[in-house]
Amino acid sequence: MMLVYVSETPIASPAPPAPSTTRTTAAPVRPAPAPLLTPLGLLTVLLGAALPLIDFFIVNVALPTIDRDLHAGPAMLEMVVAGYGVAYATLLVLGGRLGDMAGRRRLFLWGLAAFGLTSLACGLAPDAWTLVAARVTQGAAAALLLPQVLATIQAATTGKRRAKAVSLYGGTAGVSSAVGQVLGGLLVSVNLAGSGWRAVFLVNVPIAAAAWLLAARTVPESRSPHPSRVDGPGTALLATALITLLLPLTEGRAAGWPLWSWLLLAVFPFAAVAFVAVERRAERTGRTPLVPPSLFRIPSVRSGLTMIVPFSLGFGGFMFVVAVALQSGLHYGPLAAGVSLAPLCVAFFVASLAGPRLVQRFGRKVVVTGSLIQGAGLLLLALTVHADWPGIPVAALAPSMTVLGAGQGLVLPVLMRIVLSELPATQAGVGGGVLVTTQQSGLALGVATLGTLFLSLVPTTGIRDAFLAALLTQLAIVAGTTLLGLRLPRTLR
């Protein structure tokens, strides 16, 4: 603070002399301006967000090649997928809290570096067990990286710029899931320098390095003004709850539903109840819980997360099932299986860009309409599969994939915007962590539930009818999501 001293000296004159005084004027202290996220900085954090989201699905089209190369077997292949997803979902909220404490830019850079190194370990894995271990650590790195993206957007943007940034994040989240399978199919088919499936992991290394260099120059630092210590009991109980739910559901079927899978499922409800009780007590006694229960008393958070769960469940299950069905049932190669999803990617991204303007004009009708369009795309795909199987060319899937992607692109980005719309800046990290944890847990549950339904029906009904059953199940989920959309506020911020 600068102090300015002004001295007035009496001067001889006919008029009475003015008294000598000394006045001290303090310049007003203005708060430091909030860090500004430039367009290049936004592009950088979105690139960082795309990496872990792509990797959740990129292995789907590479699994048959991994199986042949490493002699992995069904159970080990599911662990390649599940190990990443469980570690990712389990540690996301903790990653958000660490960003609030230590600085989001700093954790973003650490996460990028760790993700690049663990991707290198995946690409160089000599056997299946090493690949599983590397995938688990890669999921942990992703959990360190991703929460910082939404938290940085919340802290470094305002108004229309924030709404646009969140919509772009939502579009990135959805498109990355489909792009993962398109890119995976392309990389496996090209077989760069004989790398085969390893290229789906090695490609992350130069991208993570480029994103790191950009982030170091363009992403502003931000952190919670009142950071708190990590909630140890809450972190342990949340990890226990997610692991006891996700691990048996993703691994149980492939392992033949052994005793350990049922024991873990039996532990889940107790761990979940204990987690809620511990978090409520922590907040009631003035401590800062890992997931503040007061967060769910914010109407936008509660209503948005309620819809994100079924949406993510259906989306995750669909992306897994369609990858298996196209390769095993229609005998598409990895490239054809990936290219068949390209119309979904393009439509999703275009719709996500249109979302902010449509929301301003039509409010919650955008979510409801998008959900109905998504349902129409699923129905059109089911009719195509029913009528033309097994001679369906890639081009015949384009209409249904386009409609499906357009509907999904109108739903997911808007739901993310709703969740974040009333979130205080001080809770940006934990709020982003809860949002992404909900999304990723839903994706993992979708792979586990719809994937298990599909794979269990294949031996008795065949791939076509099992695929149809999975599509109709997702259609029922979409119907429920549409009804939930009617409970959203009429106007959305």
Image: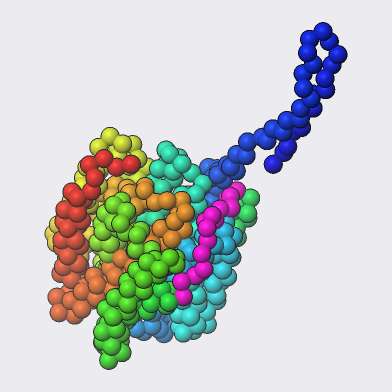
Q: Residue at x 46, y 58 (%)?
A: 429
Q: Is residue 52 magenta?
A: no
Residue 320 sits in which quadrant?
bottom left
Q: Give the answer, above or below, for where 258 lies relative to 133.
A: below
Q: Nearer the viewer, residue 442 or 121?
A: 442
Q: Is residue 419 visible?
A: yes
Q: Give the answer, above or below, for where 118 lies relative to 39.
A: below
For this orientation, the residue located farthest to the bottom is 259
Quarter of the N terminus within the rendering: top right
Residue range (magenta): 218-232
Q: Residue at x 86, y 13 (%)?
A: 12
Percent coordinates x, y for residue 195 in the rendering: 52, 71
Q: Is residue 230 magenta?
A: yes
Q: Residue at x 43, y 61 (%)?
A: 430
Q: Is 377 left, or right, of 16 in this rendering?
A: left
Quarter of the C terminus within the rendering: top left
Residue 184 sits in which quadrant?
bottom left
Percent coordinates x, y for residue 228 in the rendering: 51, 64
Q: Is 460 left, or right, of 355 in this rendering?
A: left
Q: Is 147 left, or right, of 114 in this rendering?
A: left
For this orientation, the residue located farthest to the right is 12
Q: Is 26 left, or right, of 359 in this rendering?
A: right
Q: Nearer the viewer, residue 323 or 414?
A: 414
Q: Residue at x 76, y 30 (%)?
A: 22
Percent coordinates x, y for residue 33 in the rendering: 58, 42
Q: How many marks?
A: 0
Colour mode?
A: rainbow
Q: Give the answer, above or below, for where 490 lies relative to 181.
A: above
Q: Is residue 49 visible?
A: no
| Predominant SS of the magenta segment | loop
Percent coordinates x, y for residue 244 in the rendering: 33, 80
